[in-house]
Image (tube, rainbow, N blue to C red):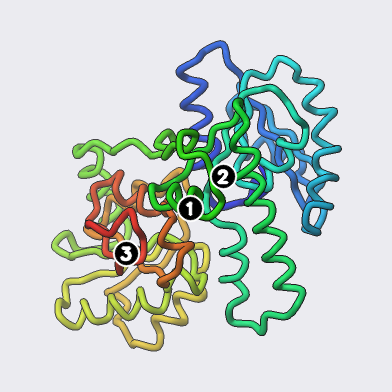
Amino acid sequence: MYDGVHNPVFQSQVIEPLIKQLDQNPNDRGIIISFERTTISQKEQQALVVDPRIRLITVPKLPFLGTLSLHYATRQLSPIMQQHIHTAMITCRGPMAAWVVGHLNLPIPCIVQARGLAAQEYRYAHSSKIIGWLHRIRAWQYEQIEQWVYGAYAHNKNVMVQTVSKALRSYLIETFNAPADKIMVADHDVPSAISPAQRSTWRTEIRELLKIPHHAYVYVYNGSAKPWQCPQETVQFFVREYQKNPDAFLLVLTQDTGTFKTLIKRYALPPNAFHITRVAHTKIYRYLAAADAGMLLRKPHIINWVSRPTKALEYHAVGLKIIHNNTISMLKNI
């Protein structure tokens, strides 16, 4: 891993799929190697990974300086891999991790997880700024890494690529000349559907806890307040729905509670029309089950079009109607 154990989807997209895989193969064990900018204490590691079949190894991570940083990471990874010579398979989360592993020239079967588009995401993140020569160089560096991983490296016989969507698969083939016969659309990390009986129990439990009327039509937003996730548009959408239906209710599950409270103040919604809270991932499905519809608005951009938002999978797992604005390919027919 190169995106860190504090990534919001570490539990749902790394730990849980690995546990599921180990459950299917009782003799297997898992090792997670993560490059980290900050020191992760032993106590914190134990809190992050509680399954005794999984070992977490953290390695110091340099600031991103293109392939110079990745060469250093490869040198750090080499002795660790030599200690685990019986490794049966390597999974690389994203192009940076794949570049590091790829330059060890290991004959071990390798799966590259394509989660998104690094260069395009970097350009988008800096789109509101004056793109100077440094930003252009940085975006070019990401693009060169992606070109090598999805182009040259993906053609190796021991390498397979997993994408999160059909749209991303097509993009990698068309843009980086990725081998079509070696790219699959992953579904191993899709959460299982919650049974109707369990959803009904949780729905009643959480509505009573939050004092949400049982007859209310609840819209839920689960996510952060990053601009590309359209927090303001999400609130504006709900305000329009509330004006049409006074029984509408907005439930916001977020780490950015302050931002959403500020947004909602602009529209003078009554306190009994919304609830904003942060919820541990282990309880997220309980709270989602209290809703009727999940909100997933995004800016029109290629990084959103090829994505497979974790939130969409979570909404689907509890049977929610998904409200979106046709900016994500996988939702376009909903």
Dividing the picture into quadrants, the one containing residue 150 is: top right
Which quadrant of the rendered structure holds the N terminus? top right
Task: Give me the disc on residue 174.
Answer: 1
Q: Earlier in the sequence, mark 3 or mark 2?
A: 2
Which residue is at 75% across, 77% downward? 133
Callout 1: 10 Å neighbours few (<14), some, many (20+)? few
Say what secondary structure mark 1 lies in.
helix
How much space separates mark 2 and mark 1, taking CA atoms?
29 Å
Badge 1 amino acid: Glu
| Residue 219 horizontal side relative to residue 33, left or right | left
Which residue is at 60% across, 46% downward? 94
Say what secondary structure mark 2 lies in.
helix
Badge 2 amino acid: Phe
| Residue 63 horizontal side relative to residue 158, left or right | right
Can you give x and y, in whole percent of width and height, for residue 328 in the image?
36, 61
Callout 3: 10 Å neighbours few (<14), some, many (20+)? many
Task: Give me the disc on residue 295.
Answer: 3
Callout 2: 10 Å neighbours few (<14), some, many (20+)? some
Q: Which residue is mark 2?
A: 10
